[in-house]
Amino acid sequence: MTATTLTSRSSPKTANPLRRRRSTALLLAGIPIGLALLALTMVFSIAFGAADIAPRAVMEAVFAFNPENTQHLIIQTLRIPRAAVAVMVGASLAVAGAIMQGLTRNPLADPGILGIQTGAALGVVAAVYFFNIGSLTLYALFAFTGAALTAAAVYALGSIGRGGPTPFKLTIAGAALTALLSSLTTLILLFDQTTLEEVRFWMAGSVAGRDLNLLLQAMPYLTVGLVVAMALGRQITTISLGEDIAKGLGQNTGWVKALSAVAVVLLAGGAVAVAGPIGFIGLVIPHAVRAIVGVDYRWVLPYAALAGAIFLLVADVAARMVLRPTELPVGVMTALIGGPFFIYLVRWRVKR
């Protein structure tokens, strides 16, 4: 009996490492599968549009470019930059949303819902209105400034009162600031028709008409933000379990939060500077990813980057096909998909 008891007690302990290794192996295998799916989605994004192009022609334009071929020129100058922008913006917004949800332990946290994208958009609109700026590099600077100030304001307002920055108070503060900043942005646009024409299509959120030069200007910010985010995966996992637990394990939570905030501002600000405020990616994708990989942010963040890129590519293709040959801004399509999911999340939180 004793041997049997000992065996039965020890067997779960010996089984757990095997489960962990199997789980890790599956998660590692999922990365190349996700990359292959991303590559396939990019091909479809490049092939479909106002004029459909055969996938074979897409491959020829990439590997055997002929400048005299009209289809090759369309692919190289319009379709490939558009797909590349969608990949970087989708990945950046999804990772930013995942970080915010992990740090605040708020399932409703998102660069759009907490006002960070609205603050970045107001920064760009103010730059165009007050300084007549048209350079993406300066767009990015003002977008980062607006995003950082808004993030600090939301956290400060959400920390007022007893209990500190609770998820509910952060959401309310973000909603209030979003309404305020949106009103200020609208006020500027109403007073200046030139600024409205300059940023009208950009404000709806779109990856159309962006070229590789624009993306290359924003790439340093987005790349640094993604690298910092991936490096903080283990620390964000610990904080997501509770700040007291993280401190008990010897983690410097202040530095982790500061670096995470820098990553969010770089990712959200850079994405807004390139494509305008595209909502709901940072809200929807982290929840979908956690349902697959669990709550370990060492896996949540890379999977969120892949899923966010794929999601925005698919949404962009759908935006082109719904009212063909007219196309919708991709921000409208992500809102149509993410809006119902947001309502579901709110109802779920209320029930809990």
Image: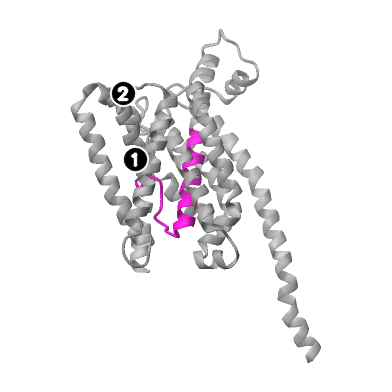
The circle on residue 100 is none
Position above or below: 338 against 186 = below
Please tell me how crowded label 2 is: few (under 14), some (14-19), or many (20+) other residues with Cα within 10 Å. Answer: few
Image coords of residue 128 (percent x, y): 31, 25
- At a point 30% along the width and 30% down the height, the residue shown is 126
Separation of residues labelled 2 and 1 (CA atoms): 17 Å
- At a point 72% along the width and 66% down the height, the residue shown is 17
- At a point 44% along the width and 24% down the height, the residue shown is 210
Point out the residue furthest to the bottom here.
1
In reply to whether residue 189 is colored magenta, the answer given is no
- Residue position marked by numbered label 1 in the rendering: 119
Amino acid beneath label 1: Gly
The range drawn in magenta is 86-115
- At a point 56% along the width and 61% down the height, the residue shown is 238
* Screen quadrant of the N terminus: bottom right
Amino acid beneath label 2: Phe
Quarter of the image holding residue 131?
Answer: top left
* Left or right of residue 287: residue 2: right
* Left or right of residue 266: residue 124: left
* Left or right of residue 217: residue 161: left
* Screen quadrant of the C terminus: bottom left
Point out the residue furthest to the left here.
191
Question: Would you say the magenta stretch is mainly helix, strand or loop?
Answer: helix
Secondary structure beneath label 2: helix
- Residue position marked by numbered label 2 in the rendering: 131
* Left or right of residue 187: residue 74: right
